Amino acid sequence: MIRFVLADLRRLWAASLVIVLLVALATAFGVAVTLQERAVRLGSARAADKFDLIVGAPGSETQLVLSSVFLQPAALPLMSGEVLTKLAADPRVAWAAPIGFGDNFAGYPIVGTTNALVTGTTSGFIEGDMFAHEGEAVIGSGVDLAIGAEVKPMHGQAGEGGETHADSIYRVVGKLQPTGTAWDRAILVPIQAVWHVHGLGEDHDHEEAGHDEHAAAGHEVGADHEGEAAEDHHHGHIDADAAIDEDFDHGVPGLPAILVKPKTIADAYALRQAYRAEGSTRAIFPAEVLTGLYATLGDARAVLMYVAYGAQALVAAALMLIAVIHVAQRRRQIGALRAFGAPRLAVFGIVWLELLLLVAIGVGAGFAIGYGAAEFLAGLFTAQSGVRLPVEFTADDAMLAAAFLAIASLMAALPAALAYRQSPVEALRG
């Protein structure tokens, strides 16, 4: 029977190809929507996992997450810099890192922060080392720049009235390992550099003389330590924490957001409650905000899936029509088979198996095309945002494929039943 089916399909290859393409395209649409929606959920959740708590000014929680975690440009309201001072001194906080943004270079966002965030959210460097002075920058793995390259920050976008800060240049000193987040496309610089570029925090100059500032703030730095730091800097390995990080005692300019790493889960909830109750700040868990976004995303997916189901229903109706016409056109062939002694069940099996095989090939091709489309879209998204979207099948997809085949087997039974009931005498006469 299998040989007869394959020979018949080869003989009717054009019609068979049309059926396979119809099934493949209808299946691919639904598969691509499902895989892409799942990839966005997984990718965004994994990107947000690195940031336990975000503190910002009252306003849109969604925009705070999009700007802080996914580095989407937006004009966020500023909160008092004293919030950073309090968080840095809070025993419940492992580290608190300010972020400042607004500038970019060649489409890559320039983010001002501290060493604590870089060391706390990444797994080290591909090459180079941490920034140690205001004129130095560390880049994410997705930034197409080399060590030693110069970065001239631009406020706004090129071609849209953006202005380059001609008096400010950063030199790339390190490139980070991939993280699969939007920060892979970021250029990280000391937060003090961002303040100074925009005329803020002029009393926060942390050049090499910054060691004296630490001493004045109660961080004693002996002459031997200063000598060691100068020698380390000569070799490109100055203690960046001693030179730049966490000197907040002179008053900090307003900040759009602070990324906080609590020491424990209980500390995280306590901190969120404390900085929500103040009224002048808003503390959020990124995962909670993303849950709301997922609900919106799920609604959009549901609409697209209904469209996909409608397309699949139309394809199923078209296939039924094609199959019935196909059986009618093969009356003589079916009659000849019956006249030569082929039992009715054999004729039923041939017609049923042919249609089921074509649908199965179409479903398989549809899953492959849908996966390829989802991978392509995920690649475009990653190239633009830096967030890696994992496109992967799950057990639910296998169940979906099985459901498609089960429905196809029932559909194929109708034209097969027509062939089964056909009289060989009438068929040969016709």
Image (cartoon, rainbow, N blue to C red):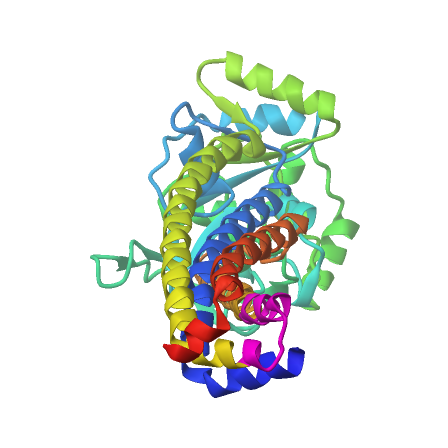
Relative depth, front residue between 218 and 70: 70
For image coordinates 46% across by 35% down, the residue present is: 293
Percent position of residue 285, x then y: 57, 29
- Magenta segment: 337-354
Query: What secondary structure characterizes most of the magenta part?
Result: helix
For image coordinates 43% across by 74% down, the residue present is: 427
Q: Quadrant of the C terminus?
A: bottom left
Percent position of residue 320, x then y: 41, 60
Relative depth, front residue between 142 and 241: 142
- Is 31 one of the magenta-colored residues? no
Percent position of residue 160, x then y: 21, 58
The outermost residue toward the right is 224
Residue 1, by quadrant, is bottom right
Q: Tell me: 83 left or right of 110.
A: right
Q: Tell me: 382 left or right of 244.
A: left
Percent position of residue 399, x then y: 64, 50
* Residue 386 can be seen in this image: no
* Residue 158 can be seen in this image: yes
Relative depth, front residue between 25 and 404: 404
